[in-house]
Image (spheres, grey):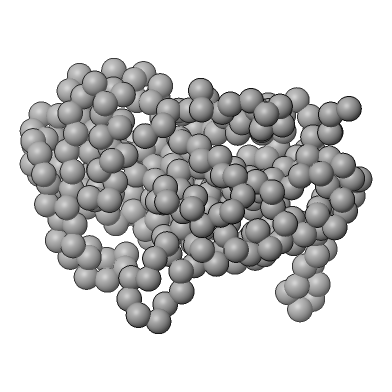
Amino acid sequence: MSASVKIFSGRASESLAKKIAQSYGISLGNVIVQDFSDGEFQPSFEESVRGADVFIIQSTFPPADNLMELLMMVDAAKRASARRVVAVIPYFGYARQDRKDKPRVPIGAKLVASMLESAGITRLITMDLHADQLQGFFEVPVDHLYASTIFLPYIKSLNLENLTMASPDMGGSKRANSYAKALGCEVVICYKQRAKANQIENMFVIGDVEGKDIVLVDDMVDTAGTLTKAADLMLEKGANSVRAVCTHPILSGKAYEKLENSNIKELIVTDTIPLRKEHPKIKQLSVADLFSEVIHNVVNYESISSLFVNY
C-alpha cells in the first residue's frame, strides 16, 4: 500500500502552501503554532503523520524564526514516525553565505544545510538557489527547480520587438545567457563594483543596448539597488525599455521607494516570498502548480527534469 501524502506549512509560506495543496488535490494539513510570552514557540501537528510522506513548505527569509519554525516542524514530523520528511523551501535563506569571503566568518548556507539534515529531512525541494553548488552542501537528494519555467512563457507573451536579456552582474551571466538562448535573442552584462554589501560604487554595461527592449534577470531582488541602477544605466545608453524578472522578491529596506523612482517599467517576480505590499510596477506569478507537479513526481518516483527548463 502506498504511503499517504500530507502537505503542511509554516506561517511564513501559508498562502503559497494553500495554493500548492489545492493544485495537488488535497487539503493543507492542520498544524498549529503556540506562541509563548518570552518569544519562544512550539509547532504541533494536529493530525497523524505516521507512515506518511510529509512535505513541509516554508521559505526561510528573515526573521530567523522562519528557519527555526521549519526545523522544529521537521523534528516533530520525524518523531511522529513520518515515512519521509521533505523540506520544501521555495526561497532558501542564507544562500548568499556560500563561502568564506574574508577571514573568521561562517559559511551560513552550509550551517543551514547541516541543521536541516540533523533535524531529519530526507529530501529538499527548492527553487533558484543563489549558487547551484549549494546542492553539494547536502547529503540528501536536492530537487532544484528553476523559475524560468514560469518566466519564459510570460516574457514571450510580451512580444517585445527588440528583446535583449541582461544580467545585472557578472555572477548572473550564465542565467541571462540561458534565457537568451531559450528566447533566441542577444545578451548584455553589467559589471559592478561594490563599496560594501548592498552598496554599489561603479557599474558598466558590456554590450550594445541602444534601441533594445531589455529584460534584466536575477535570482532575487533585495534592496533593488543593483536593478534600479542597471535600469537607469541601460536607458542612458539608449535602451528603449527596461523590465526585470527576479525569482525571490525580498524587497528589503527602501526597495519599494527605489522601484517607484526607477526607470524599470515592470518587475516580474514569483510568490516564493509573500510581497510586503502591492505595487503597480510589480507583477507576481505563482509557482504553486510547478511545486505541486514536482511533489507528485517525487511521491511516485517519477522524473522531474521534464517539468522545468534547466540552465
Asked if residue 81 shows in the view, the reply is: yes
Q: Nearer the viewer, residue 119 or 262?
A: 119
| Picture quadrant where residue 105 is located | bottom left
In the figure, 188 relative to 232: above or below?
above
Total numbered circles? 0
State left or right for residue 237 relative to residue 57: left
State left or right for residue 206 relative to residue 89: left
Q: Quadrant of the C terminus?
A: top left
Q: Position of residue 194 (x, y in %)?
A: 22, 65
Q: Nearer the viewer, residue 129 or 223?
A: 129
In the figure, 109 relative to 49: above or below?
below
Asked if residue 280 shows in the view, the reply is: no
| Picture quadrant where residue 287 is located | top right
Q: Position of residue 174 (x, y in %)?
A: 28, 41
Write the residue at 65% across / 58% down: 117
State left or right for residue 70 relative to residue 209: right
State left or right for residue 228 relative to residue 127: left
Which residue is most to the bottom?
104
Q: Nearer the viewer, residue 124 or 192?
A: 124
Write the residue at 11% across / 44% down: 206
Which residue is most to the front?
139
Write the residue at 19% across / 34% down: 187
Q: Position of residue 207 (x, y in %)?
A: 10, 39
Q: Nearer the viewer, residue 185 or 74?
A: 74
Write the residue at 31% across / 24% down: 182
Q: Quadrant of the N terminus?
A: top right
Q: Position of residue 122 (x, y in %)?
A: 69, 49
